[in-house]
Image: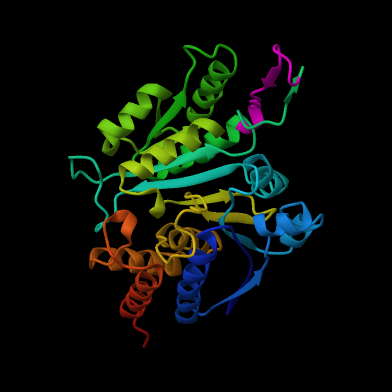
Amino acid sequence: MSTHSIAVIAGDGIGKEVVPAAITCLERIAGIHGLNLAFTYFDWGSDYYGRNGRMMPADGLDQLARHDAIFLGAVGSPEVPDTESLWGLLIPIRREFQQYINLRPVRTLDGVTSPLASDKPIDILIVRENNEGEYSEVGGRMYRGLPHETAVQETIFTRLGVSRAAHFAASLAASRQGRLTSATKSNGIIHTMPFWDEVIEETARQYPGVTVTHELVDALAAHLVLKPWTLDVIVASNLLGDILSDLGSAVTGSIGVAPSANLNPEGDFPSLFEPVHGSAPDIAGKGLANPVGQIWSGAMMLEHLGHPDAAAHLQSAFESALRDGHSTRDVGGTSSTSEFTAAVLTAIDAHAPVTA
């Protein structure tokens, strides 16, 4: 029996509802596939901040480092500034554990209606550079409170950071349709984005079956709305990848179904799996949250841990539940979080592999 230690941080808002829902599904899958998923729960987040003045304890990263993966719900609360909630938990995890790839699938699902008139299927993987770029810590403010108050934020691109994102994306493209699209803005940003373009181009040449197209991010945003089915793999900087993936999930029906993986591909550190959606304080505690993004993130975690059959089983189960008409309010349905989870559990049992 394969054993994996999973650190669980439900976090804030609806994270406290969708994480238990997903774990119930993961435990059912684990039982069927002979896996032992050992979950350790951490009550870190905005409530912890309210009690302790920080999002996690001083040795929080050391505690997480002992696990094989991290399963996160959502972070954010109206009572805590975003700069505290994000920079006090998620970003330190991403950087300390060198989770330099943020992988975000964008795909149409049966039972989830896209706002687009076309019914052509969408299947895109967005590879977002996750450790540097526009989300650097370099910069500052001066003359606070004065008429000439000034803020400076530096974008940092390194050859290492760009090339490893490009390698990951090109390798994915090579395993799919061979089409890599790079998000850029080199017509207006004259130093960092041309450098990005050059490194992406140099790296993609190492993959003979892959063609790379450099597309200005404003045009690419329009492309995602007008003809998303023509895209395959997109590689983008930290900020641009964040924006484009949110747009992509909206185009496929709801940000509530979008998963993501913060990956340390080498496996030197634990990777983190979380839905793209936020903590949604307006619906928290009402049983309305869509758990698909969290469940799908769980399937990505199983894949990363080396269990593709279990991952495919879980994914087919939530897709089957959606196809059978079970869905939450955000995608036009009437199911509660618990009702949809029950439908997924039924589908897991119905699609269980037959053993001799």
> Does residue 343 lie above or below 175 as drawn?
below
Q: Is residue 237 visible?
A: no
Would residue 156 be counted in the magenta stretch? yes
Outermost right residue: 58
Outermost bottom residue: 356
Q: Which residues fall within the magenta stretch?
A: 144-161
The x, y position of residue 13, in whole percent, is 54, 58
**Foreground: 326 or 81?**
81
Tell me where residue 196 sits by quadrant.
top right
Q: Main secondary structure of the magenta part?
A: loop
Residue name at image x 43 percent, y 40 percent: 245
The x, y position of residue 50, in whole percent, is 71, 56
**Foreground: 31 or 47?**
47
> Does residue 202 lie above or below 82 as drawn?
above
Q: Is residue 190 left or right of residue 255?
A: right
The x, y position of residue 51, in whole percent, is 75, 59
Residue name at image x 32 percent, y 27 percent: 222
